[in-house]
Image (cartoon, rainbow, N blue to C red):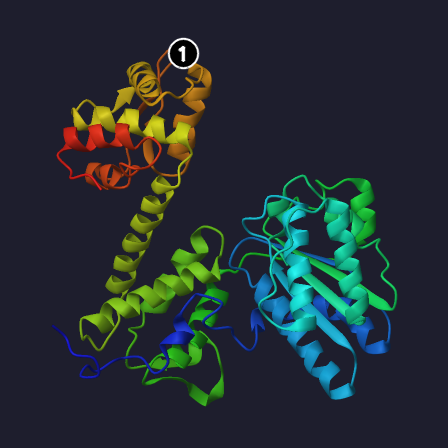
Amino acid sequence: MKAFGDEDTIFEDMDVLNPNEQTYQPESLPEREVELDQIHSALRPATMGSTPLNLIVYGQSGQGKTVGIRLKTDQLQEYADDSEMDLTVVHIRCKGMDGSYHVLTHLVKRLREKRFGPGEELPSGHQRKTLLNMVIENLEEIGGTVIVVLDEIDAIGDDDYILYELPRSNPDDVRLSLIGITNDLQFRENLDADVRSSLGEDEVRFEPYDADQLRNILSRRAVGALRDTYFEDGIEDYQHLRSEILTDDTIPLAAALGAQDTGDAREAIRLLFRATRFGDDRGETTVTEEHVREARDFLETKAIESGIQTLPNQRMLALMAVTYHGIHGDTPVTTTPIYTQYKTFCEYADVNVLSNRRFRDRLNDLADTNVLNKRQGRGRGDENQYSLAVDLDTALENLPKESERLGDVATVLREQGGVAGN
């Protein structure tokens, strides 16, 4: 057994490479100066005694949207503290909230915590209009300039009540600004015209990072996180990176893999973080391209496992039907026998049976998310063929537990596949 404190490490400050925003937040975003200037323009009226503008910030995951808003609101807060300007910034993460009602309850809670300190409870049992009035009441008690940031606001779906009512609420003696952050590039277009009018016209788009930008981002993280890693001549880009820990191809590969899909900086950082952890855990003093490839395979497997575990019931049953044929060695298999087995599982689990067409849609969904392989039928009337895109053991191990919904079906499959239940 290893003893804590006795091991050498390549890390100077491991937190800097942690992709979790709650663990580490960069102090600057050099690749986003244009976007930061646009945010600055929307917030600047607050420094002139006017109301900051409402703002919608778009961009795919990992593009710096949330960090950019935090950097600029933190900067504005510092200005307010120095100039005795009355400013309050409230951040609400809307992920997991399925409508305006839940966002309003969390907003009431956060505003109360701004007034009374942490520990306030979520209000419950109120009508939506009552919650809005509670928000307005707390805003008026706080007073001054209040900026409400709603991160991942697309989580509310079609229920845009808060986006229409809050900007129009006009609380007394409050200069209120609403900032929405969304991964949905069509979010504004999908809103009603009245809601778009309430929010105003200002918006900022964070386009995907390219490989060069990701190399520079990873280089800055590496300098902060790793020993014997620095920038030559104080120039903070990949071309001036010098490291006795990272080989020359480590960061370029992590950046290229991150840029392949959506230019997600968080994914590129996650790759480099996992690669350096693999090397450090083994007591190795260099991190190479092979560590990055190993990290990619590890993270892809973890993502697929997580995806299987959270499948809705109908997709899970479709996967189980393909898994059944995988156990019996007859994959790839056409849609008809898969559908027959699916209906058997539905009857066993007392679940409604989808039509053949809708069932095929569920199979295609699984193929689109790389859980299944799909072989297209060669001609008209030829059925598509499907097989597992993951190891049979991986599929079986991540099916529902015995105590969960569909767990009885999963237990039968695990017994047939020779995998112990959980």
View extreme (front): residue: 125
Q: Secondary structure at mark 1?
A: loop
Residue positioned 25% across, 58% down in the render:
294
Residues 272 and 346: in front is 346
Task: Answer whether residue 205 is visible to the viewer in this image.
Answer: no
Number of numbered markers: 1
Q: Which residue is mark 1?
A: 380
Depicted 102 relative to depicted 88: above or below: above
- Residue 48 higher or lower than 172, as above or below: below
Q: Amino acid at mark 1?
A: Arg
Q: Residue at x 35, y 67 (%)?
A: 273
User: Where in the figure is residue 308, as x and y percent of width and height?
Assistant: 34, 40
Residue 75 visible in the displayed image? yes
Q: Quadrant of the N terminus?
A: bottom left
| Quadrant of the image occupied by residue 72 | bottom right
As rendered, which of 118 and 401 lies closer to the eye?
A: 118
Q: Is residue 59 above or below residue 76?
A: above
Which residue is farthest top? 381
- 396 on left or right of 169: left
Residue 168 appears at what percent x and percent y? 84, 53
Which residue is found at the position 18% from the left and 71% from the top?
A: 282
| Residue depicted at 82% across the width and 72% down the height | 45
- Residue 422 lies in quadrant: top left
Q: Position of residue 73 (x, y in %)?
A: 67, 72
Query: Is disc 1 surrounded by few (<14), some (14 to 19) or many (20+) residues within 10 Å?
Result: few
Residue 210 position, x and y percent, is: 50, 60
Near-viewer residue (237 or 278): 278
Give the quadrant of residue 339. top left
